Image: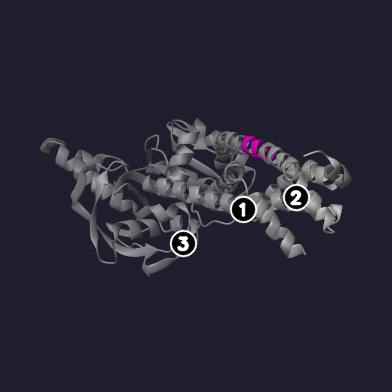
Amino acid sequence: MKTSLWRLAWRYLWANPLVSGLNLLLLSLGLAAMSFVLLVSEQIESGVRRDLAGVDLVVGAKGSPMQIMLAGLFHLDTPTGNIPLAALEQLRAQPLVASAVPLSLGDSFKGYRIVGSTHDYPALYQARLTQGRLWQAPLEAVLGAEVARASGLGLGDTFAGSHGLGEGGHEHEEQRYRVVGVLAGSGSVLDRLVLTDLASIWAVHEDMHGHEEDDHHAHDAEATPRQITLALVRYRSPLAAVSLPRWVNAQDGLQAASPALETARLLRMVGAGTEVLRGFGVVLLLAAALSVFVALLHAVRERQTDLAMLRMLGAPPQRLAGLIAAEALWLALLASTLGLALGHGLTAVLGWALAQQQSLSVVGLWFSPWELSVPLLALGLALLSSAWPAWRAYRLDVTELLQAPR
């Protein structure tokens, strides 16, 4: 009897395909918006925590702390300038500093940033190699997983970097890098970077400087003090969080950026957008619930004769109420499936768009335990919408219907 009830509810549901299709569309869109917000916000927060890599402070040239943090940890912005290499030694000499990892930026390869650093930088992310080794000499490069996949380069291949952090800059053809290693994919910022030695960055730019200057200025390249772009600092003690940023900001030309504070600001800004989208989803779900309620209430009135016949054939009142609820549950089941599929599809499209811009990693195949709330929400709305129509079916007076004039 239960199987026949569900089959009959399915037939009743699609007796009016236009209304059922509209209700299904509204409910699916609302659930898709909720699923999309869950998937994207969770991946962004997870990616941000992963890219922080335990860094307590980012030190750069004077400017915006947010810009310094975005440039140093996520490589999503241009740095505020360069700082003297001597500043790195000053940081390492501080008793409250456990480590300071230098970064030198300025060039790119097909839009992917070339980062000069030491072996301590991939160690921050516990990076693993799938091929080759880490760099040992200038102009040796290690490719992130995404860079290797997009460029098709492998061990032993050479390439020229472009001046600037975007595509279209002047290529340094006279100073070509040789690929000596490829990192395993980790989902971190390393996937979209080209790593090399600090000396590589200095050699490329000093060579370019030498070509641009007149002969009588060529010695300036050697006279210019070495510079880096940023330093990623880890504290030795929590007390450093109080005193070290103030010490850095007091130095001439140096600016400290706290990843914890700046990331909290960043997530608040991102959260404003997700709240708008979540609110849009709630409005759609409320509209869908109201539409389902009206449709089921109208269906009870239209099918009074059919329901009366079922009662005469021996169906108890609760069976009639269950028939109305089963229609709503069929709708919720279909909407949950379509909503989740659409949410993952939209997430995949966003991930593709971000990948084209060498931005944050977002994938459509991400699964969150919180997604279980989506079908539960759909079932709850369905039962809530069908409660009054099911009660009307339960209270149906068969005798009055049969005696009513036709």
Tell me if label 1 and label 2 are in contact, CB under 8 Å.
Answer: no
Q: Residue at 42%, 46% (x, y): give it.
A: 354
Against 225, residue 312 (above or below) is below
How far apart in space, not on screen, are marks 3 and 2 (Cα)? 68 Å
Which residue is labeled 3 in the image? Answer: 127
Q: Amino acid at mark 2?
A: Asp
Looking at the image, the residue that sits furthest to the front is 406
Q: Nearer the viewer, residue 122 or 198?
A: 122
Residue 374, image x and y in percent? 65, 50
Looking at the image, the residue that sits furthest to the bottom is 131
Decide which of tag 3 and tag 1 comes sooner along the chain. 3
Asked if residue 82 is among those painted magenta in the image, a careful observer would answer: no
Q: Amino acid at mark 1?
A: Leu
Q: Residue at 37%, 47% (x, y): give it.
A: 356
Residue 246, image x and y in percent? 56, 33
- 1 or 2: mark nearer the eye: 2
Which residue is labeled 2 in the image? Answer: 306
How far apart in space, not on screen, are marks 1 and 2 (Cα)? 25 Å
Answer left or right for 290 relative to 17.
right
- 3 or 2: mark nearer the eye: 2
Residue 334's disc is 1
Q: Residues within 10 Å of mark 1 (few under 14, many from 20)?
A: some
Q: Amino acid at mark 3?
A: Ala
Residue 395, image x and y in percent? 86, 44
Mark 1, secondary structure of its residue: helix
Asked if residue 284 is among those painted magenta in the image, a careful observer would answer: yes
Answer left or right for 30 relative to 6.
left
Which quadrant is the N terminus positioned in?
A: bottom right
Q: Residues within 10 Å of mark 3 (few under 14, many from 20)?
A: some
Residue 259, quarter of the rendered image: top right
Q: Does the image show residue 63?
A: yes
